[in-house]
Amino acid sequence: MHGLTLNRRHIRTCAKQYAQNFRIFQPTSKTQRANDCECPIAAEGTLMIEGLISNRSTKTYEWKKAEQIAAEWEQWGQTTAPQEIECRVITASYAVESFLASQGPQGRNVEGVIRCRSPLRSLSRLDFQIHPQHTRHR
Ligand SMILES: [Zn+2]
């Protein structure tokens, strides 16, 4: 059983000229299909983390896609994908050297790269670190 309910939220140019809040649910019969329009589909219901949502656009007007999106939201418990930013330390010298290596003698715009080489290398003395971060979007 789905925690979210999908219904169309009509736009001004609705093919059937329905009022914005006139509820059209996923059609299950021929008649309902005939009454369906092509407005964006919104979801409402309760998600584990995000809580109650209403009129949240799935940004699609296809029922199948909207169902997939709603299923994903339910799985995440929220409407945005949880992000685990990888724990990574990048030094300026590492970035500079790997950039230079990627250009190489065969690289495009070799002259420009050679001209940049020493300013880039002096930049790499300013080594810095990006601290690991874990964020969870709400
Ligand atoms: Zn419509």
Image: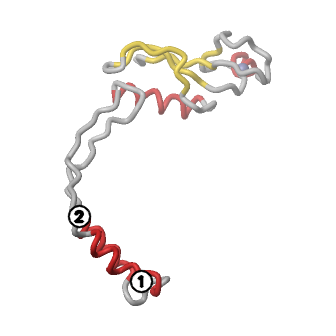
- Residue 115 placed where, x, y %? 41, 83
- Residue 17 placed where, x, y %? 79, 17
Residue 126 numbered tag: 2
- Quadrant where the C terminus sits is top left
Q: Residues within 10 Å of mark 2 (few under 14, many from 20)?
A: few
With 70 as the anchor, is 134 left or right in this view?
left
Q: Is residue 89 above or below residue 9?
A: below
Kind of residue sitting beneath label 2 = Leu
Residue shown at the point (39%, 14%) measured from the top left:
46
With 92 as the anchor, is 51 left or right in this view?
right
Q: Is residue 6 above or below residue 108?
A: above
The reply to whether the residue tagged 2 has its Cβ within 8 angstroms of ligand 1 is no
Instruction: Tell which quarter ligand 1 is in.
Output: top right
Evaluate if marks 1 and 2 touch, with contact meaning CB atoms under 8 Å apart. Answer: no
Question: SS of the residue at dot 1?
Answer: helix
- Residue 130 placed where, x, y %? 23, 52
Q: Quarter-wise, where is residue 7 in the image?
A: top right
Residue 96 numbered tag: none
Residue furthest bottom as drawn: 105
N-terminal of the pair, mark 1 or mark 2, is 1
